[in-house]
Amino acid sequence: MKTLNYKILLKKEPEGGYTVLVPSLPGCITYGETIDESIMNAKEAIELYIESLKSHGEVIPTEENILEYTLTVRENA
């Protein structure tokens, strides 16, 4: 079994809880009331996403050749 790593983004929601996005897996989005719950839900969502890709004979995206960078820009008034 191959180990895959995916970055997740947690967005705090105004009504509470966190929405989780998996940028490398389009449409892989989940939610949790706490950060810990959100991370657990993301792990499950990723596993199900990969399972679905495998069952349909599709390629499983990886982050092997992805570089991460934070870009800062100024908002013009």
Image (cartoon, rainbow, N blue to C red):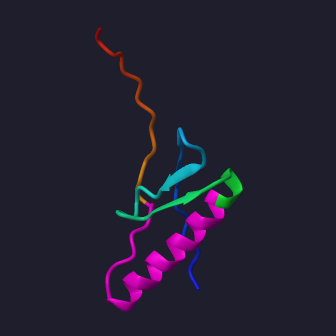
Closest to the observer, 39 or 65 = 39
Residue at horizontal 68%, vertical 52%? Answer: 34
Quarter of the image holding residue 53? Answer: bottom left
Left or right: 62 in relation to 5: left
Q: Position of residue 73 (x, y in %)?
A: 36, 21
* x and y percentages locating residue 58 in the rendered image: 32, 82
Of the 4 image quadrants, the one containing the N terminus is: bottom right
Point 29% across, 11% down: residue: 76
Which residue is pictured at 59% across the width and 68% down the height? 43
The residue positioned 57% from the left and 49% from the top of the image is 18
Q: Nearer the viewer, residue 55 or 18?
A: 18
Which residue is nearer to you in this view: 4 or 52? 52
| Position of the C terminus by quadrant | top left
Main secondary structure type of the part rendered in magenta: helix
> Relative to 15, is 47 above or below?
below
Residue range (magenta): 38-64
The relative height of residue 33 versus residue 12 in the rendered view (above or below) is below
Question: Is the residue 71 above or below the residue 46 in the image?
Answer: above
Instruction: Please check the rendered image and state whether residue 7 is part of the magenta-colored stretch, yes or no.
Output: no
Q: Residue furthest top?
A: 77
- Asked whether residue 39 is drawn in magenta, I would say yes
Left-right relation of 41 to 63 = right
Image position, residue 7 (x, y; %)? 52, 55
Q: Residue furthest left?
A: 76
